[in-house]
């Protein structure tokens, strides 16, 4: 019904895309966010890899790749439509996958995996008729680096092979800013920030109340026909108030990384794989993302709530992440050291990663190497969505909108 009252919980990429999708179809939506602004969490502070599956070589079943590819291929078209503009100014070039000596997947196996994944992308393209990812991938292929190309890319003997793959990333800061502007321009979306959701309760008539720390101040939390839970790290706890338990085992990890700006650097995008290593992303707008997994992993937990109090980014912690990340990456990419003097901006920020899976990325049997278990729970107007990946958010949002509009 067009008069349905719709609440979306969580103003990250999933919540904002869902709100915009529904508003563009004429629906009024209330978007409830606990932080002072929307898009201030993981969806602002991440690497923005628009996954085609190449990072998940430790899942030889290809199940993770198969589940990531549709959302990855759809990302650019969906987001460009919502923002009514091209994303080209914020995208990286093709990624270079560098296989580390301690990788949980050896170089030969990685190459086989990458070729099979490229085949899956080609199959998906032929089935969907789509072609434009963030670049034309209709002739997607795996390009092994020659010894001289490898030596030009990294100075480290710990890298045993390299491959150029047309997987790209997007500057999530730039997208977040554009998404915020799109929300402001959308009169059908009421944005309620600074409002913490503690529970959802079902009334006798089947409608849903959203219980927040603002209860009593207004009636905005009352009597919704549809509630979409897009709370990411806060999602399982709110689901639990309706008796919905996440698939076990799950984990919450707070990951920080370095977000920089430098137009001068000659650094190129590259990722060390497969395991707890690091990566560099250089976007077309001069922004950079630098991460070293162990330096940036600041907190983790396995309870229904993430261990928020242990993940506070103090100035001292930021300094440690910055130093650890730059020092570790410069062992592979010496130009990283130059950023300390060259970069116009060098910030440490981070966000939560909720995942169905646990363990260490250094262990090939860790369930974190598989990301195919994300799901959507639908129960009489309550729709709870595990985004799983930034790259999937617009695609999942379009699916949630279809469900709501078709109801
Ligand atoms: C360092 C890092 C690198 C990453 N790299 C990639 C990558 O390259 N590619 C990729 O695809 N993914 C990546 N991810 C994962 C990606 O960031 C997330 O999957 C994605 O941003 C989740 O989007 P979301 O909208 O579900 O969550 P969020 O953006 O976190 O939005 C959820 C919102 O809900 C709010 N909230 C939570 N609980 C409550 C509550 N109880 N009440 C009110 N509000 C609440 C939060 O404040 C937040 O604004 C990375 C994550 C990190 C941290």
Image (cartoon, rainbow, N blue to C red):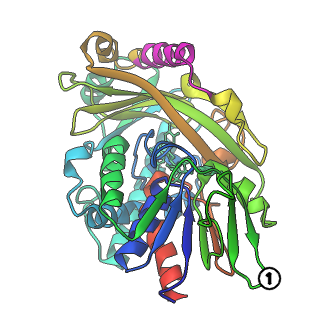
User: Closest to the observer: 341 or 280?
Assistant: 341
Disc 1: which residue: 204
Residue 253 falls within the magenta-colored stretch:
no
Query: Which x, y percent locates residue 64?
Result: 56, 58
Position of 129 with respect to 406 (left or right) is left
The residue sitting at 42% across, 56% down in the picture is: 52
- Residue 25 in which image quadrant: bottom left
Within 10 Å of disc 1 (Cα), the crowding (few <14, some 14-19, many 20+) is: few
Majority secondary structure of magenta residues: helix
* x and y percentages locating residue 137 in the rendered image: 27, 60
Name the secondary structure under disc 1: loop
338 up-or-down from 200: above or below? above
Residue at the spot 31% in from the left edge and 28% down from the top edge: 150
Residue 316 in magenta stretch: yes
Q: Which residues are magenta?
A: 312-329
Relative placement, left or right, of 32 versus 303 is: left
Outermost residue on the front side: it is: 217
Does 67 sit above or below residue 258? below
- Answer with left or right where residue 161 lies relative to residue 264: right
């Amino acid at each position: 019904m067009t008069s349905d009252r719709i609440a979306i919980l969580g103003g990250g990429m999933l919540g904002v895309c869902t709100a915009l999708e529904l508003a563009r179809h004429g629906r009024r939506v209330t978007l409830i966010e606990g932080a002072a602004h929307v898009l201030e969490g993981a969806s602002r502070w991440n690497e923005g890899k628009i996954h085609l599956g190449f990072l998940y070589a430790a899942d030889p079943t290809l199940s993770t790749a198969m589940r990531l590819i549709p959302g990855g291929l759809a990302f650019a078209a969906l987001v460009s439509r919502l923002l009514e503009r091209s994303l080209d100014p914020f995208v990286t070039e093709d990624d270079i996958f560098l296989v580390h000596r301690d990788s949980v997947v050896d170089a030969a196996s990685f190459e086989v995996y990458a070729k099979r994944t490229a085949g899956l992308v080609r199959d998906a393209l032929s089935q969907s008729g789509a072609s434009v990812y963030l670049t034309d991938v209709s002739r997607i292929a795996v390009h092994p680096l020659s010894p001289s190309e490898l030596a030009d890319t990294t100075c480290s003997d710990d890298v045993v092979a390299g491959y150029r793959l047309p997987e790209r990333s997007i500057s999530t800061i730039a997208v977040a800013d554009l998404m915020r502007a799109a929300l402001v321009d959308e009169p059908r979306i009421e944005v309620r920030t600074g409002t913490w959701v503690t529970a959802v309760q079902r009334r006798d008539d089947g409608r849903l109340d959203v219980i927040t720390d603002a209860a009593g101040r207004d009636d905005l939390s009352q009597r919704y026909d549809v509630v979409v839970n897009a709370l990411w790290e806060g999602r399982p706890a709110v689901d639990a108030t309706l008796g919905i338990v996440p698939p076990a085992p799950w984990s919450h990890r707070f990951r920080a990384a370095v977000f920089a700006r430098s137009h001068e650097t000659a650094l190129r995008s590259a990722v060390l794989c497969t395991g707890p290593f690091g990566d560099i992303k250089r976007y077309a707008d001069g922004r950079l993302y630098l991460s070293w997994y162990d330096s940036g992993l600041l907190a983790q937990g396995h309870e229904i709530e993430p261990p928020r109090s242990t993940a506070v980014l103090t100035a001292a912690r930021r300094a440690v992440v910055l130093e650890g990340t730059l020092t570790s990456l410069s062992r592979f990419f010496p130009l990283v050291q130059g950023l300390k003097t060259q970069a116009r901006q060098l910030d440490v920020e981070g966000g939560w990663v909720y995942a169905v899976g646990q363990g260490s990325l250094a262990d090939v049997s860790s369930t974190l190497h598989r990301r195919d278990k994300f799901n959507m729970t639908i129960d009489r107007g309550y729709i709870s969505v595990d985004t799983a990946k930034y790259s999937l958010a617009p695609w999942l949002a379009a699916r949630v909108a279809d469900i709501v509009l078709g109801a």
